[in-house]
Amino acid sequence: MRLHIIAALVLAASPLHAQSVGLILGNEEYENVGDVSRGDRVVRAETALSRAGMQIVARQEATLDDMTDALSEFGQMADRSDTLLVVLAGRFVHTVSETYFLPVDAETGPMATLAANTLPLSTVMAWLASAPGHAVLVLATDDAQMGFGAYLTAGIGDLDIPQGVAVLTGAPAGAEKLLTDIIARPGQNIAQPRLGMTVQGFAPEDLTLLQAQSTAPTPAPAPTPAPDLARRADIADWRRASAADTAEGYQGYIDAHPSGEFVQMANNRIRALTDTPQARAERAEQALDLSRDARREIQRDLTLLEFNTRGIDGIFGRGTRSAIQAWQTAQGVESTGYMTADQITRLDAQAERRAQELEAEAERRRQELLRADLAFWDETGAVGDEAGLRAYLARYPDGEYAEIATERLRAIENRTRNDADVADRRYWDNAQGLDTVGAYEEYLRLSNRGAFTDAAEARILELEEEDRNAEERTAAARQEDALGLSPRTRQIVEARLERLELKPGKVDGEFDNDTRRAIRRYQAARNMDETGYLSEAVVVQLLADSVRSIFR
């Protein structure tokens, strides 16, 4: 709602003193919708109007940022000006209650976001209403018919015109001639049918914007009466409501000014905001009165189906709404971002089916890995010598026989200790105490490749691998910490890993080396990154039947 906010801010600021002020926005070449032939040429009238004494703010091919800047500049001068002229040439769309002028970079997105990315004419009307009898709005476009989605129609549509405001509509060519040949010539009657412009609103027989200068002495014109305090308050409150652009804000205006000049506009805006498909969908979801657990379940289901909610917290923020919209689009239903009861049922069924599919896929992969694991074990670790056991662990550090291989190597190391000399044992104990690559390399040097050489070289390889993966492991650990898992949830995780026969060790809520290995086994069977740390995706799959209790 940037344009609304800018309007409110600049009109509250201390404006410059100017007698006649004009704003001209001319757009021809649009990025995402059809062009408007000669739409940008109205800007050519800037020179003629300036010569006639008007202060002009003009933008050609105006983007949303350009329009914001121009409105800010115009607004600083408009509040205390005697005469106001606004010219908008380009593409318009309208609903039953509002008309919007599009910048050249306008997106043809949902109606709910339209007011934030365009210029609503109700905002322009509020400015012009502050100069009754001396305010002209010129709107120029073509008759092109194009689709803008449901509930939006190309063109200007019906307008709610405040008292004392003249509105002229027509083609860009007629608007350009109107500005340069008539409005820019003080004293000329604006309402001339020869230009093909239609006049609405304030339309006396002799409609002029700029008064002709005369050398003959004439009585001083009677000053335009200043709006009384009640009308000033009416206009100010309308501007505030328009800046907020909420149903509550417009209703507040109506409550404060039940007979105000902009009551009809306010009612129209309330209908536009509350009777859209988006608003109806939001009210329907609210009527379901979903608990936080129910919302977590929906987020879990979406995540299982690979629609990222950016969290499973029971709070439907932007990430969840985007995920719901993406899921709705995939289902071929209206993508409002709000759920119906039928959609929740359908989503849950799809998620449960997907969970079963994932488990079946994981079991097939686990069996494939197990067969390869067993075959390699038979050729290496099953022989029972140190070289074979270390070869097996190098290939399958989390393999089915990793615990057996580790235990057998420990027994070999104990036998080696008994056979090694005192100095060798001392060097080895020192290296193990430090457990660094440098310490093991120092052992190899001092012992002259002693009895623990194979163990030292294997440990060097392990530590070097850990160093290479340190950054990834740290990131995975942070990701797990961010989940905020309670000790009870950690026990549930370990119990689930145990039921899957992944050997997580003691079920105590403490994630030790056995737990990390079990998590890596789980990740391997599901073709995930084998970090040994939990992520949201891992938890969602691992505890698909218990997710309600996870993120409390």
Image (spheres, helix red, strand yellow):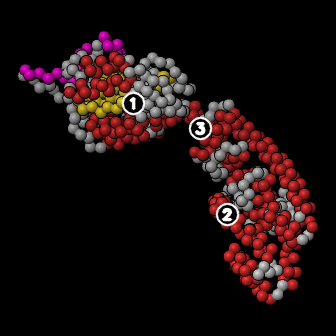
Task: Specify whether 184 is left or right of 477.
Answer: left
Q: Amino acid at mark 3?
A: Glu
Any part of residue 129 in sight: no
Number of residues whose C-alpha sits closer than 10 Å to that of mark 3, classed few (under 14), some (14–19) or many (20 or more): some
Q: Pick out the residue farthest to the bottom.
A: 422
Q: Nearer the viewer, residue 480 or 314?
A: 480
Q: Quadrant of residue 45?
A: top left
The magenta-colored residue range is 194-216
Residue shown at 92% from the left, 65% from the top: 382
Which quadrant of the structure image shows residue 337?
top right
Q: Earlier in the sequence, mark 2 or mark 3?
A: 3
For label 1, the residue is: 61
Element assignment for label 3: helix
Q: Earlier in the sequence, mark 3 or mark 1?
A: 1
* Nearer the camera: disc 1 or disc 2: 2
For disc 3, the marked residue is 282
- Secondary element at tag 1: loop
Going by the numbered disc 1, the residue's amino acid type is Glu
How packed mark 1 is, by other alpha carbons closer than 10 Å (few <14, some 14-19, many 20 or more), is many
Assign the magenta stretch its main secondary structure. loop
Question: What's the residue at 79%, 74% (across, down)?
Answer: 455
Instruction: Give the percent coordinates (x, y) of residue 57.
Output: 30, 33
Question: Where residue 468 is drawn, which disc sits there?
Answer: 2
